[in-house]
Amino acid sequence: MRIDLIADPSRQAPAWTLRDRLEKLLGPGYECGVIATTELAAALPNLVVLLVEGDRVAEAREACRRTCLTAPGCIVLAAGAEDAHAELETLLAAGAADLLYLPASDIEMLARIHRAASMAPAHQAAGGGAVDPRLAHVIGHSEPIRRLLMRLPRLSTSDAGIMIFGETGTGKEVFAQAVHRLSDRAGKPWVPINCGAIPVDLMEAELFGHVRGAYTGATSARAGLVEEADGGTLFLDDVDCLSLAAQSKLLRLLQEREFRPVGSNSLRHADIRVVAASNRDLEGEAGRGSFRKDLYYRLTELSFTLPPLRERREDIPPLASHFMRQYARQLRKPMSVMAPQAMRILSRHDWPGNVRELQHTIHRAVLLSPGAMLDQSDFQLGGGAAESAGEASFSGAKARLVRDFERDYIREALARCDGNITTAARESGKHRRAFFALMRKHGIEPPRASART
């Protein structure tokens, strides 16, 4: 995120001092500068801090109005002396989003900056183009994400299939839902399905429904997810887990817009768009025969790949701040600030589980933190990066042991059962979906055969 301090060119010394302080406090993911109002159009900041000097409030109001006109997507935070409280409040009418009274403590300054930053549009495209406001829920400022967000409206205009590739936890469902929101089907059903979490013998009935008596236990007819998604979008996550038989029926659905419920003799029409996702090399799987080539080509009429979080580290601070505020609200905790050292620790971590791992880490930290600000002691990441002098808290050590135990237990259970998820879950005394959720949590990929058992 870019933050610029606006100050009169002849009086920029205080602005540079404040800028150095902000850069030190905010850490990675934030770019700070000092500019004049006339430089706004070229700088394109997400947030500006407008410094109000002494009795120059009238000039500041005019600068605030010019800022809002020149950069309509930019948030203005007015900063000035507390003894000018009444005068500063007039800037709110001129377009300022909030006020920062100086001098301010580090915590107060971070809270105000983060609050103002949360009001800013999540993205601004390279070259000055604005990202569609319907994508405000997608968080990220990195160049790969901004380029992708600029492409999404064009990808969403047709009914062509879209394939989303990316490692586990990169946010494939978030981007699939963004495609739905941008399309003409936005007001119609959005139906996601995790193909890897449904047993292979139930997959066709889940997708296409069944008639009464189609199989043992089918005491009444039941509509499938395809029919539920009629008019809208069907999202197939982990589409590589479909059996070859299910792939064949999915191909017919995509080509003819028709499907047949299990046990039925009649065809039904389906007006849906299919968006699919996979963390595997589907092209290689198609070449080896474990995934139908014709289905692969049909699904990948349009496609894009989400980069792992370690390749877009500048997205870590805004994501971490978002998750912190989200869980603070859910848990009703007065928490709005993350210590700079904590943010640096998060930004240096490689995040093998990507955004999902970051989300779980922040959730745990907010839940267990005793204070109103997350600091480095609230995070225990792999290798002990967040611990000082090797001293871990009791809760941190316990969380790490539980994490390691879960990961090792799941791997051993899968190995004992030759990768069969259903058998491993049964022997572990867990429901198959819960067992699969643990696999996803720890980024455990079973052998190819296990995904279809």
Image (cartoon, rainbow, N blue to C red):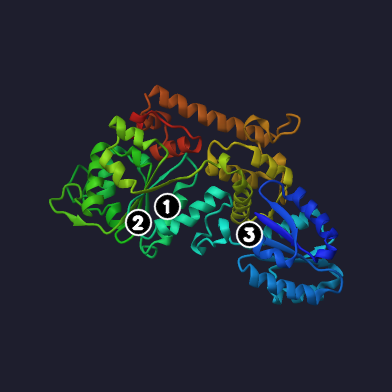
Quadrant of the frame with the C terminus? top left
Cα distance, mark 1 to mark 2? 9 Å
The x, y position of residue 200, in whole percent, is 29, 38
Q: Answer yes or no: do the residues labelled 1 and 2 have beta carbons within 8 Å?
A: yes
Mark 2 crowdedness (10 Å alpha carbons): few <14, some 14-19, many ≥20? many
Q: Answer yes or no: do the residues labelled 2 and 3 have beta carbons within 8 Å?
A: no
Badge 2 marks a residue whose secondary structure is strand
Cα distance, mark 1 to mark 3? 23 Å
Mark 1 crowdedness (10 Å alpha carbons): few <14, some 14-19, many ≥20? many
Q: Return the residue nearer the eye: 216 or 257.
A: 257
Tell me the kind of residue under disc 3. Ser
Q: Return the residue nearer the eye: 407 or 149.
A: 149
The x, y position of residue 267, in whole percent, is 16, 54
Tell me the kind of residue under disc 1. Ala
Q: Earlier in the sequence, mark 2 or mark 3?
A: 3
| Residue that label 3 marks | 118
Instruction: Answer yes or no: is residue 437 visible.
Output: yes
| Residue that label 1 marks | 176
Q: Earlier in the sequence, mark 1 or mark 2?
A: 1
Q: Is residue 142 left or right of residue 447?
A: right
* Residue depicted at x 63% and y 35%: 381
| Residue that label 2 marks | 233
Which quadrant of the figure has residue 445?
A: top left
Cα distance, mark 2 to mark 3? 30 Å
Q: Earlier in the sequence, mark 1 or mark 3?
A: 3
Tell me the kind of residue under disc 2. Thr
Q: Is residue 233 left or right of residue 101?
A: left
The x, y position of residue 395, in whole percent, is 66, 36
* Residue depicted at x 68% and y 51%: 30
Instruction: Answer yes or no: is residue 209 visible.
Output: no
